[in-house]
Amino acid sequence: MPRAQTVTLLREGDGGLVRRTTLPGGLRVITEQLPGVRSAAFGVWVGVGSRDETRGQMGSAHYLEHLLFKGTAARSALDISASIEAVGGDLNAFTTKEYTCYYARVIDQDLPLAIEVVCDVVTGALIRTEDVEAERGVILEEIAMHEDDPGDVVHDVFAAALYGDSAMGRPILGTVDTISAISRRAINGFYRRRYQPSSIVVSAAGNLDHDEVVRRVRRAFAPVLDPQADTAPPRDARGGSHATAATSVVERPTEQAHLVLGVPGLTRTDPRRYALSVLSTAVGGGMSSRLFQEVREKRGLAYSVYSYAQGFSDSGVFGVYAGCLPSKLETVLDVCRSQLADVAARGLTEEELQRGRGQVRGSTVLGHEDPGARMTRIAKSELHGDPLLPISGILERIDAVTGAQVRDVARELLDAPMTLAVIGPFDESTQFAAAG
């Protein structure tokens, strides 16, 4: 079998030794060695999410997340969960619009077990008809639970309004109709076509040895590694994610109205993302933020109000969420629009800029203090093709954000026509002066 290729991405002096090995067939294994801890996190990241589905496949990526834990040739569903829980570990998975992750967190001495179990789950799932049918009911229950929380659903309504009839605008869970209709053959075909080694990044962080992790991963993936396959990560063949301004109102007899007001943002690799993080934090990232102070503290209009920025491979979102009494919705909208317009016109004050940088700086460091966060960071960097920076390098970029950079980003994003999503006791023909 052809030799694997190993490179060092970060040295120990950068905070942790990060190495990457590319195995025959394109499977990438990346680890960060953290000798000072007694645990390890291991994940298999598949570059397939809900945006890779056709309309008829809606919910397939998330459906697979469930089915892969239902059993392999070597393990039953109980064996899979019990093996990790017996050593006090945590085994789970999640699906996003652009990738799916299967992971385990264990004591360092149990990392070999975690590697064996998680890799078996990803490579050896049986996708039996009886499991598809059993899990169909579970997913329909999950959709029902999601639908019962309008604070969650409003984000789906916003995505549909912003991205329209495209995969980016569709819910990750799928719908009752698509989940009820999808067949075992379709799910299995999606699994066999999309879960290819060249689309997968395996990551681990903690008290570990890179070469030992690679040996165990190579052994676990041996049945699916094709040394003749293309070793390059697949090109991004996803459809576009063109965003348009729109207003969408969903009528529900709720006690509270929920809204998301937003615009297209920056891609996840845009160098201006650091300025956007500072902007979002200052606008709605904490109790000292503009929106919290203006909407909640000064006026008492809402209990929850915040802003967020999310980047994808070819697009992004900047949004504001608020939950309030239906009678206060128009006032909340007016205050939010006024604050966003002021930031677009004038930028942040020096005090806001310093506080925003400090919050982003602190959250960056505190958010990477455990092996699970480190495992996630190195995996996303590799999966997205984004150069891996040491934490010190990220902090330097945050500290370098200027008021002028924040103002330029704010003017570019917040001067654009806005999309509004609302859920509450309003007639669906209700007009809110938000878009345009």
Image: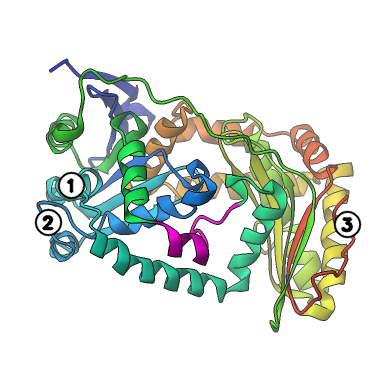
**What residue lies at 38% left-to-right and 29% top-to-bottom?**
14
Q: Find the magenta span and give its range.
A: 170-182
Q: Residue 63 appears at what percent x and percent y?
A: 38, 57
Question: In the image, is residue 287 above or below residue 279?
Answer: below
Q: Are marks 2 and 3 in contact (CB under 8 Å)?
A: no
Residue 303 lies in quadrant: bottom right
The residue labelled by disc 1 is 120
Residue 304 lies in quadrant: bottom right
Q: Earlier in the sequence, mark 2 or mark 1?
A: 2
Q: Residue 169 appears at what percent x and percent y?
A: 62, 50
**What residue lies at 68% left-to-right and 37% top-to-bottom?**
275
Measure how far apart labels 2 and 1 are at the Cα level.
8 Å
User: Please, which residue is most extreme toward the top here?
Assistant: 2
The residue labelled by disc 2 is 75
Instruction: Judge by depth and name the residue closer to the eye, 318 or 399.
Output: 318
| Membership of 110 in magenta stretch | no
Q: Residue 75 appears at what percent x and percent y?
A: 12, 56
Q: Is residue 94 left or right of residue 247?
A: left
User: Which is closer to the viewer, label 1 or label 3?
Assistant: 1
